[in-house]
Amino acid sequence: METKTFSSIFYLRNSRLDKNGKAGIYFRITVNGQRAELSIKRKTSPEKWCSAKGRIKGSSKEAKEMNHYMDQLETKAYEIYSKLMVKKKPYNAETIKNKLLGKGTEHKTLLAIYGEHNAQIKELIGSDYSYGAYRRHVRTMNHLARFIQKEYKVSDLYVMEVDLNFVNRFHHYLKTQKIGNQNTVTKYVVNFKKIMRMAFANNWVKKDPFYSWKAEWKKVERNVLTEAELRSLIDLQLESKSLEQVRDIFVFCCFTGLAYVDVKKLSNSHIVNGIEGKRWIKIKRAKTDSLSSVPLLPIAEKILRKYEDHSQKLITAALLPVISNQKTNAYLKEIASACEIKKKLTFHLARHTFATTVTLANGISIESVSKMLGHQSLKTTQIYAKVIDKKLYDDMSILQGKY
């Protein structure tokens, strides 16, 4: 923790003389280079003032009384600073000034604001927010709390102390914690940015610390399975029932576009009869709370029938026996090796494969794919269209080489 430096000084505002030629005396408190100033409601003539000492010259009764009053103010300010430091409470120059003036109103603290924000989101899960959005902010707040404790050795900070340097240090801290890739780190900082924008809108901070900060996103190449790889996965004979189960659920998601968290909660209530009696999946995505509508293709129907009597169904009502994400990805690594698929096979690859190989590559419109994936914006779906364009370009490049 950086030790906060404290200093104080009395000075005269010579530029503002009253009709009697006297200037107001001001008290300046400085903590870590940040200042707070207040008038002590006293005046004196500039010729009677000693700038070096910050006191009135001479030994007259007026000088003694005024200098004694300033001594008391300075002592009280130092006592306030010492108590705050010992108690490890968040403070700055403004805090000491307000306590000196006897103001009872406390400034807002960062984690207290974030906690209130998260409590409000929690109450609106299912209407305005998804559970996933709530959890993302909870994780961001936890990272902030650990950062503040590590860097400042206090449990919280006044929100007015957050500046661009704080933002950059938090960004650096997240990188050193190896919590994920560059985009994951950026997402946490962007979540924090929302809180500071809210603080700025409420006048809890004088300026937006994110004004000069720019999010840095790394372009991610989305891996997908080709039609041949998907076919080899479907046809693969597996002796292990656990591997077969994981492969089947992965394939199911390749033909429905469901994410892990959504297929795990898939129940009979999400299967509805649509046009011409065809069965559809209609489910609100956990990540965005937007509706995903997907017609059940024959291969997906076949997998549902295969597991209609699985043992977990009696306990969870889930249509498929989904195990933990970590164990699933470990099994997928074994399955990829058995299929001789060189790509890193993770569960989310199924959703990418549905968006590209299964739908867009077969002429399904991007608007329809967006609806099935439950995207809130067509821009999100267009990422997959770019993957298809790249595939077409690569194929044509091979053809160009031949001719």
Image (spheres, grey):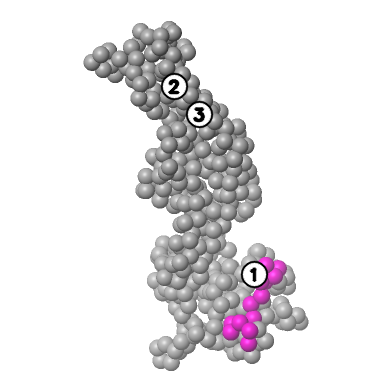
| Element at label 3 | helix
Q: Is residue 276 above or below residue 130?
A: below
Q: Which mark is residue 69?
A: 2
Q: Magenta residues, as a range?
A: 314-330
Nearest to the observer: residue 32 or residue 272:
32
Rounded to the nearest angstrom, the CA distance separating label 1 from label 3 is: 58 Å
> Residue 185: x percent and y percent?
56, 51
Q: Give percent across and percent down for residue 390.
A: 50, 61
Residue identifier under label 1:
325
* Mark 1–mark 2 distance (CA, rounded to whole Å): 68 Å
Disc 2/disc 3 C-alpha distance (Å): 11 Å
Quarter of the rendering occupied by the N terminus: top right
Identified at 43% across, 74% down, the residue is: 291
The amino acid type, in three-letter code, at marker 3 is Lys
Give coordinates of residue 106: x percent, y percent: 45, 44
Q: Do the residues bearing badges 1 and 3 touch, measured as CB atoms within 8 Å?
A: no
Amino acid type at mark 2: Tyr
Circle 2 SS class: helix
Pointer 2 with pointer 3, Cβ within 8 A: no
- In primary-sequence order, the first of circles 1 and 2 is 2
- N-terminal-most mark, 1 or 3: 3
Is residue 318 located in the magenta-colored stretch of the structure? yes
How many residues crowd around disc 3 within 10 Å: few (fewer than 14), some, or many (20 or more)? Answer: some
Q: Nearer the viewer, residue 334 or 3?
A: 3
For image coordinates 39% across by 23% down, the residue present is 26
Q: Quadrant of residue 57?
A: top left
Query: Disc 1 vs disc 3: which is toward the camera?
Result: 3
Q: Which residue is mark 3?
A: 76
